[in-house]
Image (cartoon, rainbow, N blue to C red):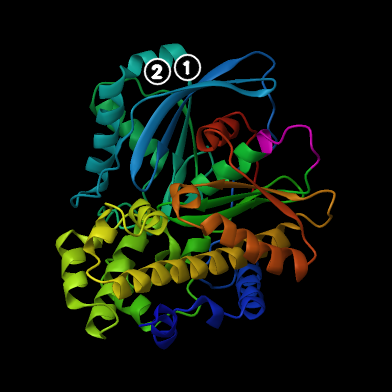
Amino acid sequence: MSAVRFLERHGMLASGIDRKRELVRFLDEMERVREGGEGSLKMIPAFLGGYHSPKDPQKLTVMDIGGTNVRTGIVEMGPEGMISSFLFTPFLTPGLEKEMNAETFFRIIAEGVSTQHPWEEFTSRAGSRLGICFSFALNPLEGRDAEVAFGAKQINVPDLVGQRIGSSFRNALRSLGKPADQKITVINDAVAAALGGRSFRGEKNYGGYLGFIYGTGTNTSYCTRDGKVVNVESGAYCSFPTGDIDDAYDRSLIDTGQDRFEKMVAGGFQKGLADFVLRYSAEEGEISSRTYALLHERNAAALEPWEVRAFAEDPLGNGMIAQSCSSSGDRKFLLELFDELTNRSARLCGISITAAMIMAEAGTGRDRPAFITAEGSAFTGQKGFREKLNAEMEYLACRENGLSYEFHTVPEVIFRGTAVACLSDSRDI
């Protein structure tokens, strides 16, 4: 039994991915889309200009509508950046458990926020500004609103695409009899990560700023030399080499053919992909039918990254995967399998980040590295991912392209970046 040979047979081995060739292809598509051509990447510029730190502390209401949870809080910004944040208990993003229309989606969010804290107190405590970070592809609109461009990370809201986030949330507040006259700014989470990192940079002189999201989904963004922010929507990329199990998993989803890169690596899809990989492993005799039956009985389709991490750190422990292994051979195969899939995730993410650095002309000098704000539960929670990603970046970005970089985790970066967007100038694309 060999996980390496199994993955190689199915076209899913990291070592089978030519980094330099795939970087060229990724950059070619970025350039083509940026110039108005067709492609799966989006290269969406934000309607944001310069950020002016307030002379006196200002409070804002900030909302983060993510692929898993909705979080709301009050952020205070001052001359030196974020002074404080008060966050309320998150609640589950609507549409994950059952299908609904967009009107219901926004009404549930408005109800959830108002249940946690009287909405009238948000406006009285935090003034007239509201920032909304929406963790899906967005087309920015004049007036600081944005509409959903495509996809929604398996959220079952069929008519969500084309909806204006700010005005839809405002309408939901009004339907509940809540005050809805806030000045709303809507941005994407990757944009928020780049802006939050740029505002947190400290005194060191960095050579550019990028945002990297690796959680429920994956994405990159970068700040251009003239101050614009570009949302790459890298998770939507569809030209990385996929294996036949990747393709089978994609066909099982509601958005077949879309977001292929994201479906290969992101936390929101790893558990579903893992279930397909385990089923194929059992069918081909790589693991015993008993081990697979125990994993399936314990709901391998909901296999979370933290369970894989627990297994990697203690293969003989009490975790779900460890307890499902019926032989030492199965245990060895699964350890190797999950490690190799992490290798592939790191390689693909390294390619996408390096491409964004090159496009942004970031990190071109050793003394001025690119500041890459990394955000997402899988970045910190997936066993070995960060170390493997650094190895990929050292090879592709540093050795092959002469770039330098630093990964940073910035406290409450999404709230911080969304608040920065609220206080930034509007500008034409």
Res. 328 visible in picture: yes
Residue 43 visible here: no
Badge 1 crowding class, 10 Å Cα cut-off, few under 14, some 14 to 19, many 20 or more, is some
Residue 25 to residue 421: above or below:
below
216 sits to left or right of 395 = left
Given residues 339 and 81, the one toward you in this image is 339
Residue 63 against residue 389 in the figure, above or below? above
Main SS of the magenta segment? Answer: loop
Q: Quadrant of the N terminus?
A: bottom left
Pinpoint residue 299: horizontal percent, then vertical percent.
Answer: 19, 59
Q: Which residue is mark 2?
A: 122
Numbered disc 2: secondary structure: helix
* The magenta stretch spans residue 381: no
Residue type, label 1: Ala
Give the quadrant of residue 69: top left
According to the picture, the residue beneath numbered tag 1 turns out to be 126
- Disc 1 on helix, strand or loop? helix
What range is drawn magenta here?
198-205
How many residues crowd around disc 2 within 10 Å: few (fewer than 14), some, or many (20 or more)?
Answer: many
Residue 200, magenta (yes or no): yes
> Does 252 sit above or below residue 101?
below
Q: Residue at x 54, y 48 (%)?
A: 190
Amino acid on which disc 2 is placed? Phe
